[in-house]
Amino acid sequence: MWQHKTISVILPTLNEKKSIRKVIKQFEKLKLADEIIVVNNNAVKGTSKEVSRTSAREVFEPVRGYGSAIRRGLREAKGYYLVICEPDGTFEARDLYKLLSYSLEFDFVVGTRTTQSLIWEGANMGLFLKWGNYIAGKIVEFLFNTAQLTDAGCTYRLINRQAYRTIEPYIHEEGNSFGLEMIILIILHKIPFIQIPVNYKRRVGVSSVTGSRSKALILGIEMIWITLKYWFVVNK
């Protein structure tokens, strides 16, 4: 708990068998989460066995896609603070303290992985991904005249239940653009938010998206398209 309010941590998994148990244990060690939910989104064989060795509760989402997995996890969660993270070892569980420290003043707190001093050796945040996420974030910041955004794709984030209920009916994305749509909906509904620096480390295994430059480029184009689509809707 935090300030007498419950916390749910949501971890979507597809190809994180080798890292997921360690990540769950890191969150358990913090003794902050009232529940840890693993959303098995057609994950590789053996993932469930790793999860069963922890206190996490595993649920299954048959519809493939990052957005589908997160939305299922958010529906299952019972906490007031809803925390989304990756079980691939790229984030530090202890950065949850950072997110929570801003949660009294902001309903939505999202990380940024573009602070150079917090990018660990071996992290997949080279020139292409770092500046791609930075530019996409700045496009959103400029078009919607909103709070500083230096990373459009960071998936370590916290939202309180009331704020999520506000935007939930308007969410459409089921794939990897879900995270950006969430940010844009937060902006459009004038929900107070802030982006803060978090640690970013080498991934265990290979990402199904950022592990391929071509797939990362396609995702970048999708993110820009979603941004422009919402901007045109607002300004038509």
Image: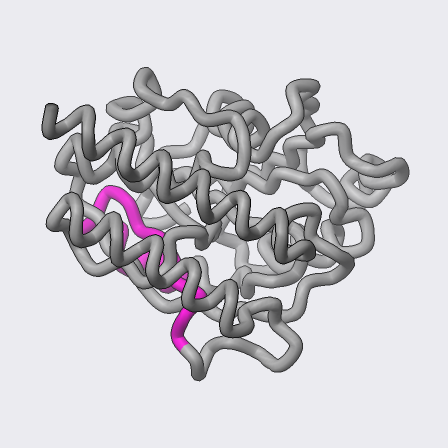
In the rendered image, is residue 104 in sight?
no
Say if the magenta span includes residue 176: no
Quarter holding residue 59 = top right
Q: Which residues are magenta?
A: 97-115
Say if the magenta span includes residue 113: yes
- Residue 229 place in picture, x, y as percent: 28, 30
Q: Residue at x 75, y 51 (%)?
A: 21
Using residue 154 as the reference point, say whether residue 14 is left or right of it. right
- Residue 199 place in picture, x, y as percent: 49, 70
Colour scheme in use:
one colour
- Residue 35 place in picture, x, y as percent: 55, 38
Q: Residue at x 74, y 56 (%)?
A: 206
Nearer to me, 7 or 15: 15
Q: Residue at x 24, y 37 (%)?
A: 186
The quadrant of the rendering that contains the C terminus is: top left
Quarter holding residue 102 = bottom left
- Residue 70 place in picture, x, y as percent: 53, 32
Q: Residue at x 72, y 39 (%)?
A: 14
Q: Looking at this rendering, what residue extends furthest in the top direction?
A: 169
Nearer to me, 111 or 95: 111
In the rendered image, is residue 103 in sight?
yes
Report how many numbered discs are placed on residues in the image: 0
In the rendered image, the vertical position of residue 19 relative to residue 226, given as above or below: below
Using residue 89 as the reference point, say whether residue 108 is left or right of it. left
